[in-house]
Amino acid sequence: MRLGKKTRWSLGLVAIVLLLGGLATHRVLQQARETAQAYLFAYPLVLMELTKQHQKLLGTTAINGFRHSRRFPDARFNSVVSPNVDTLYSIVHFDLRREPVVMNIPDTAGHYYMMPIMDAWTNVVASPGTRTIGSGAKTFLVVGPTWRGEVPAGMEPIRIPTQMAWMIGRIKSRGPADYAEVHALQDRFRLMPLSAWQGRPQTPVPVAMAELPPLDRARGPDRQLAGWSRAAFFGAFCHLLGDNPARAEDAPMLARIRAAGLLDEGCALQQSPLQRLGSALGYRKAVALLEDSKRLMGEGKTHHGWRIGYELGEYGTRYPQRALVAKIGLGANAPEDAIYPSLHTDAEGRPLSGERRYVLHFAAGQLPPARAFWSLTLYDERQLLSANPLDRYALGDRNDLHYNPDGSLDILVQHEAPTDEAQRRNWLPAPEGRFNLFLRLYWPEPEVLERRWLPPAIRTLP
C-alpha cells in the first residue's frame, strides 16, 4: 500500500517524538547514574566535616588539640558508628589552613597505642604507634598541603594532602581497673599549633570548613546525612573541595561530576530540567543504597559469612568501598594496624537476630592471632552499641573467659542470659532484634594478613 505524503509526514513526526522521548529517558537515566556515583565519591568528605562539627557540638573533640576519652563509650554514644570498647580514644580534628601542628608523643612505657591520622577523604596518611615507632618519645610536625615553611630541628614531618584531617588515637585499656594509669599517659601527649610552640601569638581557627544544615545532637552523623537534600549535600561537597583537594587519579570522576552539573564555581546546582530530574532519581537511589549496606557490598566472597576487608585505610579509586567503610566504620585503620571481620548473617544466610541463640567456637590454638589484642563487639542494626543489663558490649582476650578443657573457647551470643555461671562469663548480650558482630584484631599476625587464618562459622543453637 502506498502511503500519502501527509501520512508519511505524520508517521515521521511520531518516530521523531518517540526518538526524542527515548533520548530524554536515556539522558535522565544517565544523569541518575552519574549522580549516584558522585554521591558515593563525595560521601566520605562530607561525612568527615559533619562528624567534626557534630563532635564539637557534643564537646567530644577539639580542633588542633587533644580531647581524651576517660571511659569506654556506651549505648548512649552515637557520634561515630562502630565504636570500640577496647581502647580509650584520644581524638583530634586537625585544621591546617593557617599553620602546622606540633605533636609530641611521650615514652609510653610499654602501653600499646596507635595515633592514625586520616586525610579528609578517610585515607590513612600516617600511623605513629607501638607498631611503627615503638614506645620511645618522638615529636612530629603535622603539615597541610599549602605550607612551605622549614621543619624545626628535632621534628619529623607528617604531610597531609588536605587541610582537614582526623586523628583517632587509641590506647589499650582493660577498663576501670587501669583507667587511672591510662589517663596519666594520655595527659603526657602534647599537641599545639606551631606558633604556640615557638612562643608567637596565635589566631583561633574557625570550626567550620563548610556551612551545614542544622545539627541534631541526638542523631549520629550518618543518620543526619541520609536526610539532607541534594542541594545541601553537593553544596557542602563543593565548599569542602577547595581546602581538601582530591587526588590526581580522581580527575576523571571530578570531570564527570562537573559535566552532570553537580559542581561549579558558585557551589549551586546549575542543571537543565532533565538533569534535575535524573539527579533527583539518582540521589534518592544512592542514599537508599548506602543505607542498605548489604546490598552495596553485594554477595561478594565471604568466609563462613564473615566479610573481611584487607584493603582498608587506603582506597585509591574504589569509591563505593570507601563510602561504605565511612558509613559503617568511619575511621577504619590500615590492615597492618587492624583487621575487622564482620558478620551479619548466620550459616543459613539469615540476619543475626536476638530471636535465636548462637555460639562462636574457636578451636584450641585457633584464637584470633593478634600482637596487641583481639575482641568481638556486638552492634545493633544502627551500627551502635546495644544496651544490655551488664553494660557488656564486647568480649576478648582482656576478659576472664572460661575455656574448655581442650583449650578451645565458646562465645555465646544471645538475648537471654545463660543460666550456667561459666557460660555467663562468655556471654555477649544481644538485643531482641537484628544485630551484627565485629571481630577486631589489632596488630594482626602475618597469618591474618596473608589470609592463612580465618574466623570460624557462627552456629545457631537449638
Image: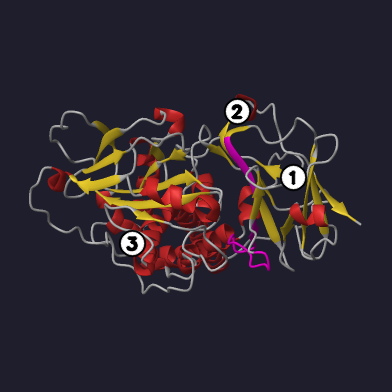
Q: Where is residue 78 drawn, in percent x and y?
A: 50, 65
Q: Quadrant of residue 58?
A: bottom left
Q: Could you tell me if residue 271 is visible in this image?
A: no
Q: Where is residue 166 drawn, in percent x and y?
A: 36, 49
* Residue 7 lies within the magenta run: no
Rendered residue at 44%/57% (across/down): 70
Gap in Å between the C-alphas at discs 1 and 3? Answer: 37 Å
Q: Tell me if 186 is positioned left or right of 403 in this view.
A: left
Which quadrant would the C terminus be assigned to in this image? bottom right
Numbered circle sitting on residue 305? 1
Gap in Å between the C-alphas at discs 1 and 2? Answer: 22 Å
**What segment is highlighted magenta in the picture?**
372-390
Gap in Å between the C-alphas at discs 3 and 2? Answer: 41 Å
Residue tagged 2: 445
Numbered circle sitting on residue 236? 3
* 342, above or below 281, in the image: above
Amino acid type of the residue that numbered disc 2 sits on in the rendered structure:
Glu
Rendered residue at 47%/74% (across/down): 218
Nearer the observer, disc 1 or disc 2?
Answer: 2
